Image (cartoon, rainbow, N blue to C red):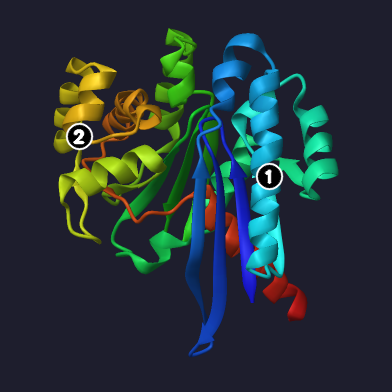
């Protein structure tokens, strides 16, 4: 069975195609293709309140490409979700209709809480040590999703309008940060030590740069050190010194600021980065629903 997930975020749109094979009665998810297009919808939406004509055309053209790729790979099932920028865009529904007419792709606009749940669908914590509690931190362009997991149960989930594109455009207020801090202090508590599970393109990049072995965590002190370095460099210097694309170089320090704040406020000093995403969660969600229907 081949399953595709489309995640239209505030910074980029991604198409993930997986083949699912049953191995010892358990599903094995094999990545066939991952395509990322930096649409940067949040640059329009968070400043103008809507998606401009140029980026609207980019969305439609990108979805045509995604549709063609799904046909080439003979995808059996797919789900396409749009998050923070499309949620806030005054013309979001009109663009969704244009995409449907041009590509046949049905896009759902999901809430921040649904976005957090999709990250949880990856079930990464289930394979980790039960002596710990886990906080999933997913940092996107428009929002940050937190999901707290303890004793095999989801205890708390919340979406905050604090994201890298919003920070880049100086659209995150002191009150936004205060709300996040208070929520974390009140809800992210446990008698067990808490570790973080990070997702999003920026933390994945920082993890790969750190040369940390897969399955091993990075420390908060390391993230603070990298943040300090990036913060002191210009975008051009980050691109040259660390071989970063411009659309990564201009937001990576903002992402690290979010991770550092969340981990500091929740007294977490280690973060695992298992390369999960909303798109991965969508794939798992589609498979789970199909599996439940069969039952």
Left or right: 91 as drawn, with respect to 281: right
Q: Nearer the viewer, residue 111 or 239?
A: 239
- Give the x, y percent position of residue 213: 18, 59
- Give the x, y percent position of residue 274: 34, 56
Q: Nearer the viewer, residue 115 or 55?
A: 55
| Residue 171 at least partly seen | yes
Q: Looking at the figure, which quarter contains the N terminus? A: bottom right
* Residue topped by disc 1: 63
Seen in the picture, residue 70 relative to 133 is either above or below; the reply is below
* Residue topped by disc 2: 242
Name the secondary structure under disc 1. helix
Residues under numbered marks 1 and 2 in contact, where contact means CB atoms less than 8 Å apart: no
Seen in the picture, residue 155 relative to 226 is either above or below; the reply is below
Q: Residues within 10 Å of mark 2 (few under 14, many from 20)?
A: few
- Give the x, y percent position of residue 214: 24, 60
Residue at figure coordinates x 55%, y 57% from the top left: 16
């Amino acid at each position: 069975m081949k399953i595709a997930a489309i995640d239209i975020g505030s910074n980029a749109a991604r198409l993930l195609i997986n083949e699912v094979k049953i191995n010892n009665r358990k599903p094995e998810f094999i990545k066939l293709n991952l395509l990322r297009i930096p649409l940067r919808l949040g640059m329009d939406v968070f400043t103008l309140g809507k998606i401009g004509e140029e980026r609207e055309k980019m969305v439609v053209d990108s979805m045509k490409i995604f549709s063609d790729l799904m046909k080439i790979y003979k995808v059996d099932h797919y789900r396409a979700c749009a998050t923070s920028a499309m949620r806030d865009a005054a013309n979001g529904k009109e663009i969704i209709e244009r995409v449907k007419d041009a590509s046949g792709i049905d896009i759902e606009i999901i809430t921040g809480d649904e976005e957090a749940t999709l990250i949880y669908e990856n079930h990464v914590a289930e394979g980790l040590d039960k002596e710990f509690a886990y906080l999933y931190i997913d940092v996107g362009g428009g929002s940050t999703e937190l999901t707290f997991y303890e004793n095999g149960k989801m205890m708390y989930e919340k979406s905050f309008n604090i994201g890298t594109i919003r920070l880049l455009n100086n659209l995150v207020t002191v009150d936004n940060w205060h709300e996040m801090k208070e929520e974390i202090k009140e809800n992210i508590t446990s008698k067990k030590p808490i570790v973080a599970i990070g997702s999003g393109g920026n933390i994945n990049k920082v993890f790969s740069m750190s040369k940390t072995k897969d399955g091993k965590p990075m420390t908060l002190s390391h993230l603070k050190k990298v943040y300090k370095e990036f913060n002191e460099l210009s975008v051009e210097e980050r691109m040259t010194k660390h071989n970063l694309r411009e659309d990564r170089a201009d937001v990576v320090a903002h992402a690290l600021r979010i991770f550092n704040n969340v981990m500091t406020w929740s007294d977490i000093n280690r973060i695992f980065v298992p390369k999960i995403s909303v798109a991965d969660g969508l794939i798992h969600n589609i498979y789970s629903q199909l599996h439940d229907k069969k039952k």
